[in-house]
Amino acid sequence: MKRWQYVKRLAPLMAMMVLVLAACGREDLSTLNPQGPVAEEQFGLMKLAIILMSIVIVVVFAISLFVIIRYRRRKGDKTIPKQVEGNHKLEIIWTVIPIIMLIILGVPTVQSVFNLAKDYSKDPEAVQVIVTSHQYWWEFEYPEYGIKTSQELIIPKGKTISIEAKSADVLHSFWVPSLAGKIDTNPNSNVNTMYFSAPKEGVYLGKCAELCGDSHGLMDFKVKSVDQSSFDRWVAAIQEPVALPSDPAIAAAFESKCLTCHAVGDLGGPAFPNLTGIGSRQSVGGILINTDDPQYSNEGSTYDNLYRWIKDPEKVKPGNQMTGAYNLTEQELKGIAEYLADLKLNYEQ
Amino acid sequence: MKEVPTLAHAHTHTVKRYSGIMDWLTTVDHKKIGILYLITGGFFFLVGGLEALLIRIQLWKPLNEFVSAGTFNELLTMHGTTMIFLAAMPMIFALMNAVIPLQIGARDVAFPFLNALGFWTFLFGGVLLNVSWFAGGAPDAGWTSYAPLAGTTYNGDHGVDYYVIGLQIAGIGTLIGGINFLVTIINMRAPGMTFMRMPMFTWASFTTSALILFAFPALTVGLVALMFDRLFDANFFDPSGGGNAVLWEHIFWIFGHPEVYILILPAFGIISEVVSTFSRKRLFGYSSMVFATILIGFLGFMVWAHHMFTTGLGPVANALFSIATMLIAIPTGIKIFNWLFTMWGGSIKFTSANLFAIGFIPTFVMGGVTGVMLAAAPADFQYHDSYFVVAHFHYVIVGGLILGIFSGLHYWWPKMFGRVLNETLGKLTFWTFFIGFHMTFFIQHFLGLLGMPRRIWTYLDGLGFNEMNMISTVGAFLMGLGTIFFLLNVTVTAFKPKNAAADPWEDGRTLEWTIPSPPPEYNFIQTPLVRGYDAYWKEKMDGHTEMTPAEPIGPIHMPSGSILPFLMSLGLFIAGFGFMYAPDWGNLGSLNTGYIIGAIGLLITFGCMITRSVKPDHGFHIEVEELLHDKGGKA
Amino acid sequence: MSAHSHVEGQLPHEPEKATLEGRNKILGFWLFLGGETVLFGTLFAVFLALRDQVLGGPTANELFQLPLVAAATAILLTSSLTSVFAIHALHTHRVKALINWLIITVVLGLGFLGLEIYEFYHYVHEGHGFTTSAFSSSFYTLVGFHGAHVALGIVWISLIIGQLMKNGLNTTTAPKVYVAGMYWHFIDVVWVFIFTVVYLMGKVG
């Protein structure tokens, strides 16, 4: 029985150390595998805390184990042990040592708090992005370029991205774990700021991290870090005018049933996700991944995803605002899905 | 239960003594109220546990559709709300009611009528909250009910109304209980029991009661404001009316953080009692323990914004709250080491109660250290609202509080029910629950670090979350099994003869073990004289088998039972429904039906209050003959 | 439980504290007032956070008429003074004086409430209703909660006057009087804060 307890005590500790040290998790998602300086700074603080706290765990577990083995009552033992009131010296020791440990953790914590609160909103080198969260999609505006896009935040690698975060409805939270910790998005005047950068090119997964309704868990987005020239090309490409579908019937349907809410190029309305270049994005609706080799039930070709989404958005993301907003015939649906799948932006080399 | 004594009579009026169901509906006896809290809290624990299992089934594999997204949000909201307000707190109150008056040598709490009222408001509040499941939808904005999601703009059905009103009614009971125990402990200790001679469970309950007193009014204001927003179109948290969503967060967490210390401090008290008794050693560092308890309670009010690090409070606030939060680790660490050194040099017996207490220590430390990790704000930017936090708080609440409650229940069961719980089943309960617990929640730390947010209905495949979620689900079922073993134990034990000794563990140190199991209605024939800390142990070590009485035998005045607490709570329950459904139930004549019903409910409550005020309660006396009769039987 | 104190003849000096029940009630009520302090404190914090969100409605400066509020304050403060006289009568065992001072206290309380109801009625006509803005919601909730406490206190003291008339002054009724007096002082203190934070600060801006 006692040896079992021994194993039970130590096993979690061992497992924890092994897993932590294995620097595990996806490069595009894990906080333990930081891909940018902000996430790295946060990971450093995490490691410091884990090391300090492991010392506490080891000491407590060791004393616990010793005590329950050494001082267990032998069968039939009726003796009364010595009643000890306390020990002043010990009290001092186990007050002072934790205080020292907290100072070791507290100083870098405070330093980091202020470091991560740096304001880059006036920095000419930084790229300014306004993040607005909605139920259940992410809007990204680049005020310096007059660009609005959605679901995919394209950034130049290595440059500081200065974020202004707010919400159009309920509370959400903007989280790209591999690049930086999260910031909540609040409605009205409680606008927040944060910054991060992505030195390596790649696509990083973003998650909503504040309960916001039925599709809170499906409100994924992407951060795509590209080289500077690709970014410049993207900035130019997304501002080009976009042609309507070539088929007049599809174009009419698209204009009357979609462009009342959405925008492509300089046509349409601003309130809902901008569809310019949607054919080049990683996903449809943030959650249906565009791939030619679908492996999971949320994956499919861009066309299939668009078709699926537009046909029954409620099934994909319950509670979203497209549900019931329009009526399309099967032909219109297919035509629009095809049109949108072809709305690509050429910016990558 | 004890038969109604025919010798009981009061001055010159007839005394109504109830029996059967009416006895339980009208009781003002702290011991019976404790049992009522235990049964009801236990029931809601099962409800919350079922909700947890449904959550874990939905999450056992990616892209699962076991429940809908909307239902999932209801499940997670009700799981948290039920477990904290309707299971954990009532079970804490059960033990406080059952034990505190006995530990301080008192015959009841200071306000027996209010004590009953506290129970019935809790019951009706909890029932109201759970009616939502059958009435078109439970609340679904999380147990934290953040605005604007909890407002009518984004949450039009009645779910959150049930949350607001159910918690408001239940919260009244908690506040009443807090005041009751504070006055009881301050004014009604037996002669010789100075503050520094009180048992640790009494100290812990005392501090907890002070926290309740100062934390619950903040929640009251928050719930009132949210209710006004929802029912009467106010603009506290509605951005379109100038309201502020972050204000809700502040109000909620100014309550919410002390609340979690309200949850854990009684468990700390239980551990002190159990570890000491089953090591045959006095608590190591008693005065440090008292100091640490009070410091934790005090600091608990200074750290609320560590739940809001990502809200955008600014670096100064984040830095201050980080440091303040880390500081709580100091008194907590003091307590851990004092427990370990209580056992050091002792003679440790591994009863079920003690297994839970010993299991608590390393488990709670694990939860505590993740708490220190969370305290570092920049790191929290990653942990916050991920499964890392879910793991942390389940470690401290389940691995801390629930293990503590299991320990206390096994320890004090003979005192409450006159029967000792079966040891084999107890050990089975412990190991199944303990292993299941670690299996469920240890792995969740990693899920959070790997990028899994909390409160998500489902997760995508291929992210590396699958196996860990599966393990977590299996662990949850193991915890369910452990709970079943406990229920089995309770059932099996109920059929044993009611013959537990006054001091069934034979090493009792405190006053509750000096009276029969279960105690007579009046607890002590004569109030005992306390000559030191661990009052009973002191007598034992001086060769006595009983306490020295502090007063001669005389007639004992007892308060009468009353149906008013039940009716008052029923009135609030009715009023709640009336106000909630006022927009939906049309008009009766020219008046809104809902408001009429609301008014009727409030009238019932106020009518009962006035009745109580003008109708005197003379109580009744237990006469000396009966006391001598009991005393004879006791020897 | 403790025995009744049916004190034959002489009432003890502080009759409200002569029994354990009385002492429990008084301590319990002090603690309750501690909780009420947090309650009103939170309401004040909410008000302070939201007082600038007038949303196009009238501002505090435009709305509040200090003479009316000053009159209400004077009335309430006086009623607190009369409740002090009542307690003095309690301690000197003069039941008739006690009842009379309580009656005056109630009347003054009614006067305060009357002025406040008139004040609210006036504001609604100025476009400052409960649902107008965040400022208005928090104003009415804070000041209205206080008013509700005054109303409850009036009912409570009236019931006590009735009990004193029926049962006289004894160690059972004395704690009720004392505790009601504590309550009345408390709502008076809260009003002083409301007058300062809501009205005076509202005028100064």
Image (cartoon, coloured by chain):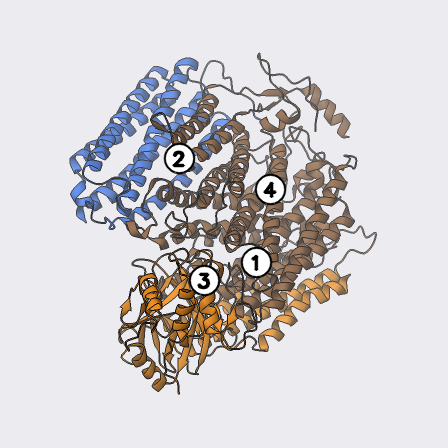
Which numbered disc, 2 or 4, marks the residue that appears first in the sequence? 4
Foreground: C119 or C48? C119
Residue for badge 3:
A311
Residue for badge 2:
B582
Please tell me if label 1 and label 3 are on a single chain: no
Residue B530 visible? The answer is no
Chain drawn in orange: A
Tell me: residue B81, above or below residue B113: below
Residue for badge 4:
B41
State the hue of chain B.
Answer: brown
Residue at the image point whose x is 66% and y is 39% from the top: B511
Please tell me if label 2 and label 4 are on a single chain: yes
Foreground: C188 or C82? C188
Of tags 1 and 3, the one toward the viewer is 3
Q: Residues within 10 Å of mark 3 (few under 14, many from 20)?
A: some
Quick one: quadrant of the C terminus of chain A?
A: bottom left
Q: Residues within 10 Å of mark 1 (few under 14, many from 20)?
A: some
Of tags 2 and 4, the one toward the viewer is 2
Which element carries disc 3, helix, strand or loop? helix
Instruction: Give the spatial CA distance, label 2 vs label 3.
Output: 39 Å
Marked residue chain, label 4: B
Marked residue chain, label 1: B
Please tell me if label 1 and label 4 are on a single chain: yes
Marked residue chain, label 2: B
